[in-house]
Image (spheres, helix red, strand yellow):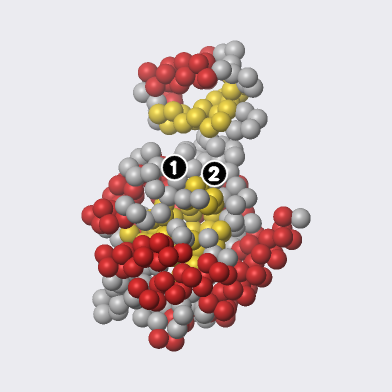
Amino acid sequence: MIAVLKKGVSDQQIENLSNWFKDKGLNVHISKGEYCTIIGLIGDTSKIDVDLLAGLEIIESVKRISEPFKSASRQFHPDDTVINIGKIKLGGGNFQIIAGPCSVESSAQITDIAEKVKAAGAGLLRGGAFKPRTSPYDFQGLGAQGIEFLLEAKKRTGLPIVTEIMNANHLDLFEEIDVIQVGARNMQNFDLLKELGKTNKPILLKRGMANTIKELLMSAEYIMAGGNENIILCERGIRTFETYTRNTLDLSAIPLLRELTHLPIVIDPSHATGISRMVKPMAMAAAAAGADGLMIEVHNDPIHALCDGAQSLTPEQFADLAAKVNKILEVVKS
């Protein structure tokens, strides 16, 4: 349930109404927009007399929300959420490109890539320290040492770091990481999501390869229910019967999510296609469709990459992609 307040309501009136709701055992979410303030109620609202509530002097309207994802719903929060990551912003018209290798292989490798993607326009650096792989015999990442190398690259370039967590027991290692990524395989690892809800770090939540948009939003809700509302949604392709590409990039998720939620939307065309030559056109299409950002795999020597070299761009190819995407964004904004 949401209560839309009339314009000009004082902070004290809002606090008094919020306390009344809390006394009834409800969790309260307050969203102050440019034109109105909305109070969202989470919990058993069956005891609330809608007519009584609507009759209050400060209430403009009262609505019940049918979607199970309350905090993530745009009805709860009409304005786009803007995620603050260090000195940069993502969402609400702030477009960012996250770029870097699938896996951190060495200090020299990640620093070299970081310097080149920053020069080409990337706002954040990605790199896997812990890698979930389909085969137990594939490279699993450098773990804690990989995080050390990422932080070294951050000191050299100033780029905020995005890297994936696989186990809540590793949270201590992520204290200096700017954005914690939840990979597709962990999208419904609810124990992990609950722990991330207790942090205040931005979380980049990837859609599972066989999950619906509703399930993605419910996973975001798990994190938000714990108190962490800094969620970035990521579409990275879903599994279909198509075999020519690694996955199928669901670009229709962008306008649909835009209607359903206030959370920022990032597209990962690298994992979606699995083919480097297809990354640029899909990145351009995502920008045209209204995405808030891109996640692009970049490697300085893709042929010899320890992980996902086939879908990785060279720094030169990434620079070309970034330039093309910027042109698309200019057209979209106009």
11 and 41: which one is in front? 11
Percent position (x, y) of residue 132?
Answer: 32, 68
Is residue 94 toward the left or the right of residue 200 in the image?
right
Q: Secondary structure at mark 1?
A: loop
Please state, as top left, top right, bottom left or bottom right, where the C terminus lies in the image: bottom right
Badge 2: how crowded within 10 Å, few (<14), some, or many (20+)?
A: many
Measure how far apart labels 2 and 1 are at the Cα level: 9 Å
Quadrant in which residue 305 is drawn: bottom left
- Residue contact at pointers 2 and 1, CB within 8 angstroms: yes
In this rendering, the answer to whether 201 lies above or below 95 is: above
Residue 229's label in the rendered image is: 1
Residue 81's label in the rendered image is: 2
Residue 42's label in the rendered image is: none
In this rendering, the answer to whether 169 lies above or below 275 is: above
132 and 169: which one is in front? 169
Point 65% across, 60% down: residue: 289
